[in-house]
Image (tube, coloured by chain):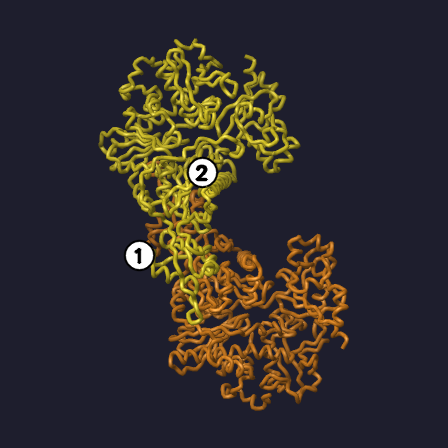
Chain colours: A orange, B yellow
Amino acid sequence: MKSNYFQITVDIEPISRRLFYTENETFYELLINSGIRVRSLCGGNGTCGKCKILVQEGKNFLNPPTNSEMNYLTPSEIRENWRLACQCRVKKPQIQLVKTHQPPQFRIFLPKDLLIEDFKILTSGKSKKINLNPNVKKFFVEINKPNLENPVPDIERILSTLSSIKNNKGIHSDVSFEIDTIRKIPLVLREDQHHISITLYNNKKFIDCEAGNTTEDCFGIAFDIGTTTLVGYLINLYNGKIYSIASALNPQTAYGEDVVSRITYTKDNPAGLAKLNSVLIESLNSIIEETCTNANVSASQIYEATIVGNSVMHHLFLNINPIYIGLSPYVPALKSDLNIRAKDVNLEISRSGYVYLLPLIAGFVGADTMGVIISSEIDEEPELTLAIDVGTNGELVIGNKDVIFTGSCAAGSALEGAHIKHGMRAAAGAIDTLKINPSDFGVEYTTINNKKPIGICGSGIIDAVAEMLRAKLLTRSGNFNKELIDHERIIKEEKNFKFILVNKDDTLIKRHITISQSDVRELQMAKGAFFSGAKLILNHLNRVNNLELEIKQILLAGAFGNYINKSNAKFIGMIPDIPDEKIFQIGNAAGIGAQNCLLNVDLRKKARKLQEKIKYVEIAIEKDFQKEYASAMYFPHLNLNLFPSLKEYADIPKR
Amino acid sequence: MKSNYFQITVDIEPISRRLFYTENETFYELLINSGIRVRSLCGGNGTCGKCKILVQEGKNFLNPPTNSEMNYLTPSEIRENWRLACQCRVKKPQIQLVKTHQPPQFRIFLPKDLLIEDFKILTSGKSKKINLNPNVKKFFVEINKPNLENPVPDIERILSTLSSIKNNKGIHSDVSFEIDTIRKIPLVLREDQHHISITLYNNKKFIDCEAGNTTEDCFGIAFDIGTTTLVGYLINLYNGKIYSIASALNPQTAYGEDVVSRITYTKDNPAGLAKLNSVLIESLNSIIEETCTNANVSASQIYEATIVGNSVMHHLFLNINPIYIGLSPYVPALKSDLNIRAKDVNLEISRSGYVYLLPLIAGFVGADTMGVIISSEIDEEPELTLAIDVGTNGELVIGNKDVIFTGSCAAGSALEGAHIKHGMRAAAGAIDTLKINPSDFGVEYTTINNKKPIGICGSGIIDAVAEMLRAKLLTRSGNFNKELIDHERIIKEEKNFKFILVNKDDTLIKRHITISQSDVRELQMAKGAFFSGAKLILNHLNRVNNLELEIKQILLAGAFGNYINKSNAKFIGMIPDIPDEKIFQIGNAAGIGAQNCLLNVDLRKKARKLQEKIKYVEIAIEKDFQKEYASAMYFPHLNLNLFPSLKEYADIPKR
């Protein structure tokens, strides 16, 4: 197969799509030909400067910047290896070389603005009803006017008014003033005849002063800072309603896919920490702007932001070096919750606004997991419950009203499409569900936005593997079933069997979309990590408490957790074998935790208390770690007794 | 006198010198010919761009900007009326016009850098011994290292160390962390094997973290923000010593001479407040840099700044609109003391440093007066004491251990050289002391830095008028004595008598230096305001307390107060007639107040308590205000019985 000589691969981030380069085409043509729609006004003629991409790997194998790029890119962008997609192509000599040598590999990053299709980002979730008791409240008052006999300063007159109403409003006896608010007072006070609305933070900090009655215009924003995805929820703190939601891919993805590679980036680049921090803050500020525009709200009336995120995201948000989270003994700078001023982290809400960060649990179990616990109220469950937050990092919580244990497992990002040949994130054109007909191995599938398929996302991969097992195309050890490899839908390339999910004629990329032997391996590692992690935490919990509890209930949190087919997740042995009706998809539980802490300040006290109750298990140093992990790599597990309900496995060969 | 036709005057700020323009000369030549040395590398050829001046009045009567100016000035500087002194001259047609019309008047401002001679700014003063108890302290500690069994976050390990030493050091039980400090911790902690120096603010805010033992490198800076003069004192908070002092003219002078004109500037210019604030902060930051360079100290180890200044300076420093201080009923935004973060006011000390502003007393009696009271301890005096802070604004304090009353008098800035024809600030070449021989009216004088005289400063003006009275050249009502006006040292110009202090041949400006009838009037108004102000406050104090106290002691504070000849001040009736040995010159008492509050935090509590004790008297609405003021315009007073010790007045004619 001559074409093999030209297997120059181009990995497209942040959608994690691997494309195959054809001689002479520009990267713009490559993207368009692969069904990835990118913005361009000139259609790839180099005259609009819109199709900017960041070359992360392989820059030396590209043609030098053209006149058009010199024109549309700044010198510093050129130094940072930004290119125009329509101007860059692989150098001729490279094309020759690959006929005899190892082909070069490329990795390019598409900025958010470039992609036309939006991604499927989970912003919803099931929220339990909570009482409204926000940290920020507004009071409408009339202030006395001064006179020559009693020339009392503005702030003293305001304080005496507050003092007269404080008893029935819970206002502190010593209210302090933020300097930005003091600056507004003299003019605002006289704008509407000394009628003003006073914004109090924590009942004691005077953080805003507006003319007239604006008590209903009091907002907060809850952020979920995921390794991959950022979501912001704009909430009215007067009535507790969500006014708008916006999300974006975490722009740090350009500098490293997972937390470990981002820590490495900060270690290897002198300005790396500042860069990761600033692109994140910039993106959060865009989300603030977007939610405000959509809800017709002024960002100056957002007085508080709450934040969940894993420990590395937490540190990067605060511009704290995360390096020691990545080195044994994996300690963060701090794990307590934190109230800081929005302007200290350049978050563009009210000049005197504050940010509340939920507490961390441990180096690799962050404020996101605390958010899951807060919103799921796992600490109030009578039955032992397993919560899995399925994101780029896999966090596990096992607990009930008496005990809570947590841990983090190295699940990898296979479920987000990485390291899967045709894997991709949940974007338009991704296969998200599928079924295989066991008689003829015909595949029925659905795609996101009903586009012609271009790849497969996490829920699709789980479905594919579960269905391949049911069709006995795979054995319990994850090998392709030798007896069926002659079927026309199975091909062999470079010693790697591949099952054709969609024939090339039916795809937008004009290539077969397949699940290969090595793709199955990736999924085995991911699901094995989840299952063994949960089992090791459970064992630890039982051992130290001298108990013999079993998991009775499962909560699947996170964007991916919500789209997953829970029967199939159980069928591949990613989660324990309990009845489907005891498995709940709780949506973006971390984000809901941030929302809840915004709406009710008492939950912050609860989070502090929970911090003492929650125990952290370092899974990798548990006894039996290796053995448990290896056993969990089988479908559904080496020990079938752990999955008594999965009768179909009786017929599936083991090896 | 033909030259009169050409009396084009150019007022030079901030030194308050009036110069007389000669046809065809550039402003550079005018300055040099008048003995004002300004920086220029090219000697006035327009090729170095150094001699930048701001034209505040008369810009339309100047030649348009030359090519050289287009080259060395930015478009925005040109719009703001900056010129190069060596390139600008009065337009020809104007020179013709003035022969028949009113001559144009100019006012130009010389930036600090332009002047070669330094000004005489008082930075010293008598300080009572105070105990060292600063708000900022450093502790050198060793922190436990983390391990896998107990992966405690950095901050928690630091807190537990602090907790173990807190009992014997007065450290609070809940220490909080500034975000900038948190950011430093992970790396600093590991720089010297977990040995760190911890900087605590107010025993409870962790504001710095440094590797190794730096406990002796702990600094503060005390600022006296005068309307005209800024002074900064860099103090080591570990040993209480002043390490260096720097001063500068308040750059706001370019936008208005006194507080009222600065309020007007903020009212008339949309960006006026921001401008006055930013030039002030910039200048304070230069002072910080200068003190640090001189003492070889890093500004990042200055952890606290304390501030005194009048109410308008206080507001402008904080970037608060001062407009309502200038409008009845003259209320400031606040008058309580204030602790704010240095970075909130852009003061370039430690990133986590704080600023303490002493409390104000009233709209026109500011934190500077509180500084005077704190440092002079007038509140502990058994005898009734009058303190006068002689600056651009005149503040008066009358008090003892039982009562304190304050007020502000409109003394004007005659004593700083303004509105006095040859008046100038206390800079090189200013006549600062003088004596007149009563027999031949010969004048003996001294000048600052022993330069040839170019003008006369405040202390010289007081001496001149006192000596002219002793020589009977003036009457008690302030008129030139008609019987002596034929003397050769007295000349008459435009109906205005002038006494020649120095003949033009002996001056650097090649003109007579004189004291004119109108100069004497200016001084009468100033000294009358001080005396009547003190008398009205005393009357008020006695009336409301039903007392009959008299002033037994006088403290002269402020730069000018220190250089004054106190016998002469009494002789002209500026201060009450009490024995010289009961009149004390206490130097820059306001600045010492700021230093003391930096060194001992208990004095801040005292200032808060004093605020309740101190009563403010609105002098201008006191009964008898007009009568008292008019009577005090006489030398020494209409009622000679108030000055029984001044026997010489028996011979001085009244009118």
Q: Secondary structure at mark 2?
A: strand
Please state, as top left, top right, bottom left or bottom right, where the N terminus of chain B lies in the image.
Answer: top right
Q: Decide if residue A625 is on the left or right side of residue A177.
A: right
Please name the residue shown 55% across and 70% down the image: A392
Reading the chain from its start, which is encountered first: label 2 or label 1?
1
Which of A253/A51 is in front? A253
The part of the image, by quadrant, that contains residue B155 is: bottom left
Badge count: 2
- Which residue carries the number 2 mark? B246
Can you identify the residue that label 1 sits on?
Answer: B168
Q: Chain of mark 2?
A: B
Same chain for labels 2 and 1? Say yes or no.
Answer: yes
Residue B403's place in the image compared with A293, above or below, is above
Residue at mark 1: chain: B
Residue B156 in picture, x, y percent from top left: 40, 63
Classify A118 as above or below B325: below
Mark 1: few/some/many CA within 10 Å (<14, 14-19, 20+):
few
> In the rendered image, which quarter is residue A40 located in?
bottom right
Query: Is A285 positioned to the left or the right of A208 in the image?
Result: right
Q: Please tell me which residue lies in front, A607 or A623.
A: A623
Q: Is residue B618 visible?
A: no
Q: From the viewer's side, name the closer residue of A549 and B213.
A: B213
Vertical order, A62 against B1 (above or below): below
CA distance separating discs 2 and 1: 37 Å
Residue A596: image x %, image y %? 44, 65
The percent position of residue A591, horizontal first and vertical second, equals 49, 66
